[in-house]
Amino acid sequence: MRTQLLSAAVLLALSSFSHAKTDVSEAANAIEKDVIQWRHHFHEHPELSNREYDTAKYVAKYLKGLGLEVQTGVAKTGVVAVLDSGKPGPVVALRADMDGLPVPEENDLSWRSKVKGEYNGKEVPVMHACGHDTHMAMLMGAAKILTDMKDELRGQIKFIFQPAEEGAPPGEMGGAEVMVKEGVLKNPDVDVVFGLHISAGLDIDKVSYKPGGAMAAVDPFKIVIHGKQAHGAYPWKSVDPIVTAAQMVMSLQTIVSREIKLIDDAAVVTVGSIHGGNRSNIIPREVELVGTIRTLDKKAREHVYEAMERKVKGIADSMGAEAELTLPLDYSYPITYNDPELTMQMLPTLQRTAGKDGAVLAKAVTGAEDFSFYQEQVPGLFLWVGGKPLDVPEADAPAHHTPEFYVDDKGMKLGVKLLTNMTLDYMHQAN
């Protein structure tokens, strides 16, 4: 491994001197007003997953204006642009997601969303309640700076604007998984991929990183328990799927509490929905459980899969019932795994860009990100960039996916610089 060959001091030296004639900080300052304007536009005009038609047109028009080779309609609404330096070198991919959420905005902003969309056949309010508006704006800013620096680059850059990170509508496919299947990492073949996510709980001017498992794999599941219906007054005539379900819910919790080595990595097994029966005096024939599994380690993920099957079958057999386990249910995200070698290679870049105290080692989270599909194919690094105003206590920062979600425009400049500097440093460190 390269990190075993290169000491931290050497890596620091490689990343600490400027490879470029252009001052990236000055370039980011110069374009900041445009980045903010783009963010406000996207925020005011959000679109739901796989419906980012106008968003994609806006992005594609801008990228074509930079003189880039642009492909549209990738994974339905995705946009991909290529910047070729004309010189040999690595292919670096930079990714931003584009979709909003069915959330009503409650912020008092001149550029707040008043948009309506359709989700599951119903009209819903739409909001960029997770910061994807900032992700697009930051990547557009980096694209401008890097295009202006074309003569100073080596290799090629792919700018990936991805739809449906929040998940495709029911019955559809979308997001990073589909982009990978459609060849977004090919022609030219990508060597490394970088991505950012704004954080409402992290101070502006800070970036957090986590080598290894940074965000969890997500595996929804469904269990259908088949019993024997009977009158509630005569339970001995039944095979009770409700009692069976209750035992399963309790037993599934012991997978994490008694079978996973939690001092290494966290895991979660959550039953989020139980459906069965319709009267107080009828023991039903069938009960359905639906839930989610979150893991941060491949071995733990494999163990949970095995344990789910073992427990579901064993409890059903012990109760005289039958059970069907569907795992994964309708989609599945891998672990968002930051390649440790790449993370250490880029750490000096993070520290130089955000300041040594501004680059913060983070703990893993059990939320999920489909950036993980890119990382399954090539080494990748996914970072959190601060969006919380400095005068707001962390406890008071609005959560992601809520009507009050808010991040400060000032946080985006660091994201623009990080995307640019990581690209430059990786290109000039590559053999």
Image: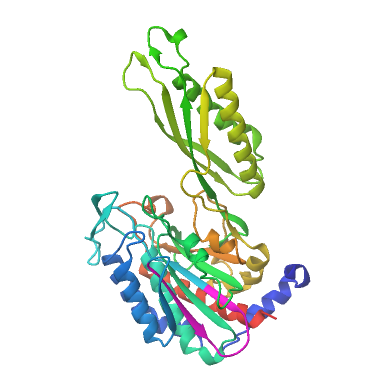
Pick the residue in front: 158 or 72: 72
Q: Is residue 422 visible?
A: no
Q: Looking at the figure, which quarter contains the C terminus?
A: bottom right
Q: Residue at x 54, y 88 (%)?
A: 85
Q: Looking at the figure, which quarter contains the N terminus?
A: bottom right
Q: Residue at x 30, y 53 (%)?
A: 102
Counting from the top left corner in percent of width and height, residue 112 is at: 25, 63
Q: Is residue 281 left or right of residue 95?
A: left
Q: Is residue 354 left or right of residue 230?
A: right
Q: Is residue 79 magenta-colored?
A: yes
Q: Which residues are magenta?
A: 77-93
Q: Residue at x 52, y 65 (%)?
A: 180
* Residue 54 picture quarter: bottom left
Q: Is residue 3 left or right of residue 31?
A: right
Pick the residue in front: 104 or 71: 71
Compared with 18, 290 (above or below) is above
Q: Residue at x 54, y 18 (%)?
A: 320
Q: Is residue 271 magenta-colored?
A: no
Compared with 364, 75 (above or below) is below
Counting from the top left corner in percent of width and height, residue 121 is at: 26, 49
